[in-house]
Image: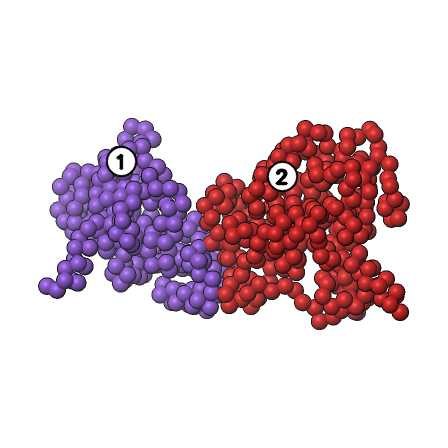
Amino acid sequence: MNDLSQAPVRDAAYNFAYLDEQTKRMIRRALLKAVAIPGYQVPFGGREMPLPYGWGTGGMQLTAAILGDDDVLKVIDQGADDTTNAVSIRRFFARTAGVATTESTPDATVIQTRHRIPETPLHADQIMVYQVPIPEPLRFIEPSETETRTMHALNDYGVMHVKLYEDIATFGHIATAYAYPVMVDERYVMDPSPIPKFDNPKLDMSPALMLFGAGREKRLYAVPPYTKVTSLDFEDHPFEAQKWEECCAICGSRDSFLDELILDDAGTQSFVCSDTYYCAQRVSQQEQGQ
Amino acid sequence: MNQALKNQLSVSTEPLLRVRDLSLLYGLEKGCQDVSFDLYPGEVLGIVGESGSGKSTLLSLLSGRLPPQRGNIGYRDKQGQWLDLYSASEAERRTLLRTEWGFVEQNPRDGLRMGVSAGANIGERLMAQGVRNYQQLRGAGLDWLSQVEIDPQRIDDLPRTFSGGMQQRLQIARNLVSSPRLVFMDEPTGGLDVSVQARLLDLLRGLVRELDLAVVIVTHDLAVARLLADRLMVMRRSRVVETGLTDQILDDPQHPYSQLLVSSVLQP
């Protein structure tokens, strides 16, 4: 892992960041439109990437389009820096763009993520890039693409609450735990990619720019800095993020998102932070304190 | 007569729907042409005719689903403002369709969301109108299930576990929950067996009178028309051949085709 954080050598056989300049320009144009209309899904000419759909091709194309020489890239998968997907995407950009990579959240300028927002608060000159599997929040109830587009255009979002209603009727509370729909800037309903609803409040008025890319569906959308993002809910069943009774088994954190680990056949559980950088930070601070 | 009553009378003497020269032809005498009529609040208009006579095309035109080639439809909304249906924006048409209007499909599977529970089906229109209180939605669901004679305990069951008659009644509840003023029905008793048909008709007749609904109902079943409709339009080969009070048309048909239609009803 450490060799990745040292200055890597760019493979000159590839254009900078893999994609050709025209493609990157096309994606940047789409990104400008997405930033201008927060939450609106902009179609773009998605390219083949050297990995399968569902592994982050959408996010990688956005990252390739915005990456510059002096950027510092962090890639996380479910909060972890050291899982397969995160490691291979980081290595991909280290090789094709020669950019510096890091695991440190505050040091990164571009953070590509699958399913988490880092616990460490983001700052204004950072860009989050999300890998999105299904960009259309209305898809579960309306299979037709023309119909969902019309619904977005006409602000016809009544059906969004049907799903939440079903949750309460079945489970007694809103059981949707990830991909929890949000209203962006009081206009467009958006699927925040499969981040846990724990992370939804971090989208609201975030100082960082949030970009979302779906490779298979060839759609991208954005939440500009300091944009109002509200999670949908009912008056008598307001939005609520997940809570744990346990604390992290490694760093003892009580306010981060915890992953459940099953330790043996008897079902013994243990909970650890899903954000590995945050957890490691806390541990090293505790050691210094001692 | 006091002033309030006078006002009420003058309001109800103004039509709700004004249709002029409505035409949409797919071919010679295929579709419907030159249809004009007025529909008044609380009135039930039956459209009868053989298969392919243009009944369903006419219903699609009336309910804003299919733009006509010629003619126009005016609708007087709750505020008394006239709205030209096809020059209004799509957003206005959609709002109308889920608030002041209802549409009961022949096949309940087309009109219901089969993947979500009965309660969610009933609550959908209210949620679309901005009701964000779960208890209120739940209450409306329970209330409407009992109004259409479905056991309220089945509120959390999926429509596919319901019988055909129950699905049709659920579809009616789903449409009526937003207290519409005008409901379109396309053969609402079409796929049901006779005893279920009778119960559904009974229920519909009760609701229509109780809620003072204006209804446009398409049917090929003259018994349904007799039971529900105040006025009938007989269609044949894309044109309206005869129009008048239901009893008048069924007991004393004037046009040869109406005579044929009435005389061809089987008498058990």
Q: Can residue B190 be seen?
A: no
Neighbourhood count class around disc 2 (C-alpha, 10 Å): few under 14, some 14–19, many 20 upward: many
State the residue in front, A220 or A141: A220
Q: Position of residue B34 (x, y in %)?
A: 23, 35
Location of residue B119 with respect to A83 vertically, above or below: below
Q: Name the chain under label 2.
A: A
Q: Name the chain under label 1.
A: B
The amino acid sitting under disc 1 is Gly
The secondary structure type at the circle numbered 2 is helix
Left or right position of B36 against B153: left
Q: Residue at x 28, y 33 (%)?
A: B70
Location of residue A152 with respect to B8 vertically, above or below: above
Q: Residue at x 81, y 51 (%)?
A: A103
Chain B colour? purple
Chain A colour? red
> How far is the residue under mark 1 from the one under mark 2?
45 Å
Q: Position of residue B10 (x, y in %)?
A: 16, 55
Residue assigned mark 1 = B71
Neighbourhood count class around disc 1 (C-alpha, 10 Å): few under 14, some 14–19, many 20 upward: some
Q: Residue furthest front?
A: A124
The secondary structure type at the circle numbered 1 is strand
Residue assigned mark 2 = A31
